[in-house]
Image (cartoon, grey):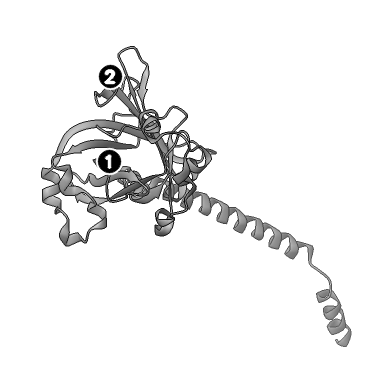
Amino acid sequence: MCTGSDSGLGSNSKSDPDSNGWSRARGAVLKSLVLVGGALLLRRLTKSTTRWDHARIVAESLNGEKFSKEQAVRDPDNYFNFRWLSCPAADMVDGSKVLYFEQAFWRTPHKPFRQRFFMVKPCAKELKCDVEVSTYAIRDAEEYKNFCDRPRDQRPQPEEVIGDIAEHLTTIHLKRCERGKRCLYEGSTPADGFPNSWQNGATYCTSELAVLKNNEIHAWDRGFDDDGNQVWGVKGGPYEFKPAPSSSFNDVLNPLSFASQPLGKRIEGSFVLQE
């Protein structure tokens, strides 16, 4: 009987081919389940991004204080260091987000030369886009100057904002960007633009907008005459607005202060100031 005990000990010291095979098979099954489960979870998460989620992402990206400082340093003859400032102003009954927007020179942030309402909502289902961004004039723009810089109780309230939404100006249809591109969303107005007679004989204008990561915004507004000639707006490409520290526009030694080209000439060629 003692020999049987010795023989049993010897057999346990060697690996069992059947046992190893089962272990490998079980490991392969577990890996497969993990991969399939991960794919299903990713698919579920992707599906959970609704039309309103896309609109919310765009609205949040448009919000905040941004500057075109880096671009203006690279090409001071064609681009200014503008301050972009936008913040939530109201919610419409249908869920659309209304944002107040103003633009100013970095040196005079409290003297905006451009004021608008943005209205952000999902595209209608029949349109081949994800988010619709429309701009509207403000009924009494003077009352809204520095809206975002004021305490909430010193701003026009949401019901007043809705009542002050005036003339529709433009609408941009944004689509999610293809993989590999820097942007998250991009789009433009229709090719024939929207009626415009602000400056230099323009009869219509076009706008292009791109939303990038880290809340960076690229915006390109241009005016054209009846013959299709560009009569206002920068020609080299969109303005690039990047979030910056609040102290960025307080730097009195900013190199943009020493641009060589006359200011009046640059304004005429770069941007429309009177709309």
Q: Which quadrant would the C terminus be assigned to in this image?
A: top left
Q: Name the residue beneath numbered marker 2.
A: 201
Q: Using the image as rendered, state which of residue 166 and residue 268 is in the foreground.
A: 268
User: Could you tell me the amino acid type at mark 1?
Assistant: Phe
Q: Which quadrant would the N terminus be assigned to in this image?
A: bottom right
Measured from the top left, where is residue 111 in percent x and y? 27, 47
Measured from the top left, where is residue 45 in percent x and y? 42, 50
Q: Residue furthest bottom?
A: 2
Crowding near pointer 1: few (<14 within 10 Å), some, many (20+)? some
Q: Secondary structure at mark 1?
A: loop
Q: Name the residue beneath numbered marker 1.
A: 113
User: Could you tell me the amino acid type at mark 2?
Assistant: Gly
Measured from the top left, where is residue 190 in percent x and y? 33, 24
User: Which disc, if any, is residue 3?
Assistant: none
* Res 245 seen here: no
Tell me which label, 2 or 1, sits earlier in the chain: 1
Q: Within the image, what quadrant is residue 170 found in?
A: top left
* Res 96 seen here: yes
Q: Residue furthest top?
A: 227
Does residue 10 lie above or below 214 as drawn? below
Q: At 87% across and 83% down in the image, what residue appears?
A: 6
| Residue 239 shown left or right of residue 154 in the figure | right
Q: Within the image, what quadrant is residue 55 found in?
A: top left
Crowding near pointer 2: few (<14 within 10 Å), some, many (20+)? some
| Residue 131 shown left or right of residue 46 in the figure | left
Q: Secondary structure at mark 2?
A: loop
Q: Using the image as rendered, state which of residue 114 and residue 40 is in the foreground.
A: 114
| Residue 202 shown left or right of residue 137 in the figure | right
Measured from the top left, where is residue 103 in percent x and y? 31, 43
Cα–Cα gap, marks 2 and 1: 20 Å
